[in-house]
Image (cartoon, rainbow, N blue to C red):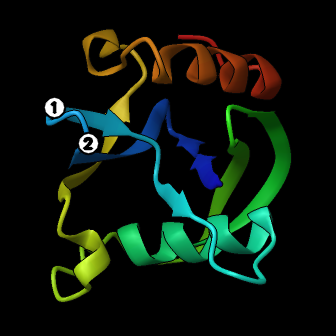
């Protein structure tokens, strides 16, 4: 099971550029696998912190399906930082706030979820 956070602030969304199993390099929402005994919420908060350095608060469960929980989150602390010493981050190339108008950065998986999040938050670009 995977838990991810969609975090929109200042007309940008927090994304991680990473290698994926199929060998491609894509921009994804931060998140990752649940550890034994973790709730999806706990996993999401931990994974976002590990991948981005940010402490977040979850606002809502946006979508659940295909063994993935997608949450709306907001930054409540920390600072943008990629911990290259964490072995779980070896697939991550870059972390960035991607402007919502840069549609070419979003693929067939992230675009629909981003649109759902924008509608939930009443964000329009």
- Residue sitting at the far right: 60
The image shows residue 5, relative to residue 55, as above or below, that is above
Query: Quick check: marks 1 and 2 in contact, CB under 8 Å?
Result: yes
- Residue at position x 63%, y 68% in the image: 34
- Tell me the residue that label 2 is attached to: 20
Percent coordinates x, y for residue 64 in the rendering? 79, 36
The image shows residue 41, relative to residue 1, as above or below, that is below
**Can residue 36 be seen?**
yes
Q: CA distance from mark 1 to mark 2?
A: 6 Å
Relative placement, left or right, of 123 versus 53 is right
Percent coordinates x, y for residue 118 in the rendering? 67, 21
Percent coordinates x, y for residue 51 in the rendering? 38, 69
- Residue at position x 43%, y 11% in the image: 108
- Tell me the residue that label 1 is attached to: 24
The kind of secondary structure element at disc 2 is: loop
- Residue at position x 38%, y 68% in the image: 52
The kind of secondary structure element at disc 1 is: loop
The image shows residue 112, relative to residue 38, as above or below, that is above
């Amino acid at each position: 099971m995977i838990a991810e956070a969609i975090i929109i602030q200042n007309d940008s969304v927090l994304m991680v550029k990473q290698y994926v199993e199929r060998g491609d390099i894509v921009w994804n929402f931060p998140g990752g696998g649940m550890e034994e005994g973790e709730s999806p919420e706990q996993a999401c908060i931990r994974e976002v912190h590990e991948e981005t350095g940010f402490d977040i608060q979850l606002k809502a469960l946006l979508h659940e399906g295909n063994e993935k929980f997608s949450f709306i989150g907001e930054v409540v602390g920390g600072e943008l930082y990629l911990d290259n010493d964490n072995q779980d981050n070896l697939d991550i190339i870059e972390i960035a706030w991607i402007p919502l108008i840069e549609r070419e950065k979003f693929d067939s998986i992230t675009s629909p979820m981003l649109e759902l999040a924008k509608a939930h938050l009443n964000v329009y670009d």
